[in-house]
Image: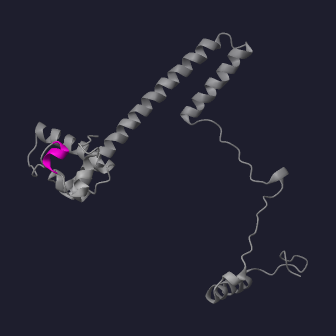
């Protein structure tokens, strides 16, 4: 990102409302029509500038004014630049995954000959586990949904002093309790909620 003489990024001059032609590297261009290589190059340059401005926190409206395009066009350049960045990221991610697969396969092949050796067997097992994780085929992790020693999870109940509640809050709580009592099935006589006599 280009930095001006004040140590600020490209968006700072626009935000101050003082973007002189020299501060951003060139004058704001009027909207252009037409196609060809020049339009493609302008589109790429506008996308780069729009991304620099957005990183600096400039609004699409101000970016459009500075570049001589509409706010919608600035937003379109931003969306395209983000899509291109995502595409490049996906391609690089795929390349890294393929390179990692090849390395793991080579490691497994090199140790397969001596797989009876415990060290080679351990390398093979770890490499296979990494490959499965890379491909998303490893077994799902088992989650424990219980408390200490297999007992139910203990939930702490916080009691709020009633003096902090307004009359409206107290009335609302009473109504909620009344509705819950009406909707709840009757509990057997030997089962009572905690804290009741």
Relative vertical location of residue 62 with respect to residue 181 in this rendering, above or below: above
Question: Which is more toward the observer, 152 or 15?
Answer: 15
Residue 140 percent across, percent down from the top left:
65, 41
Relative vertical location of residue 61 with respect to residue 149 in this rendering, above or below: below
User: Which stretch did the figure color magenta?
Assistant: 20-25
Residue 91 percent across, percent down from the top left:
39, 33
Residue located farthest toward the top when viewing the structure as drawn: 113
Q: Is residue 179 left or right of residue 6?
A: right
Question: Which is more toward the observer, 186 or 50?
Answer: 50
From the image, which quarter does the N terminus lie in?
top left
Q: How many marks?
A: 0
Question: Which is more toward the observer, 109 or 26?
Answer: 26
Kindly identify the residue that appears in the image at 58 percent across and 17 percent down.
107
Colouring convention used in this rendered image of the protein:
one colour
Residue 61 percent across, percent down from the top left:
23, 59
Q: Is residue 50 left or right of residue 114?
A: left
| Prevailing SS of the magenta stretch | helix
Kindly identify the residue that appears in the image at 32 percent across and 53 percent down.
57
From the image, which quarter does the C terminus lie in?
bottom right
Residue 93, quarter of the rendered image: top left
Relative vertical location of residue 96 with respect to residue 175 in this rendering, above or below: above
Kindly identify the residue that appears in the image at 79 percent across and 61 percent down.
154
Question: Which is more toward the observer, 10 or 51?
Answer: 10
The verdict on residue 57 being magenta is no
Residue 35 percent across, percent down from the top left:
10, 43
Kindly identify the residue that appears in the image at 65 percent across and 10 percent down.
113
Q: Is residue 194 left or right of residue 176?
A: right
């Amino acid at each position: 990102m280009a930095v001006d003489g004040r140590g600020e990024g490209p968006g700072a001059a626009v935000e101050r409302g003082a973007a002189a032609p020299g501060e951003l590297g060139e004058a704001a261009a009027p909207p252009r029509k037409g196609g060809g290589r020049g339009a493609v190059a302008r589109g790429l340059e506008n996308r780069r500038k729009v991304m620099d401005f957005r990183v600096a926190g400039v609004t699409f409206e101000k970016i459009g004014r500075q570049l001589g395009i509409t706010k919608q066009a600035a937003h379109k350049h931003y969306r395209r630049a983000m899509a291109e960045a995502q595409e490049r990221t996906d391609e690089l991610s795929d390349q890294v995954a393929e390179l990692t697969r090849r390395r793991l396969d080579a490691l497994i092949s090199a140790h397969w000959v001596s797989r009876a050796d415990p060290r080679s067997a351990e390398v093979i097992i770890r490499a296979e586990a990494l490959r499965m994780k890379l491909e998303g085929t490893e077994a799902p992790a088992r989650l424990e949904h219980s408390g200490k020693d297999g007992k139910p999870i203990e939930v702490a109940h916080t009691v709020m002093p009633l003096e902090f509640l307004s009359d409206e809050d107290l009335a609302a709580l009473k109504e909620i309790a009344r509705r819950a009592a009406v909707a709840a099935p009757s509990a057997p006589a030997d089962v009572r909620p905690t804290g009741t006599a």
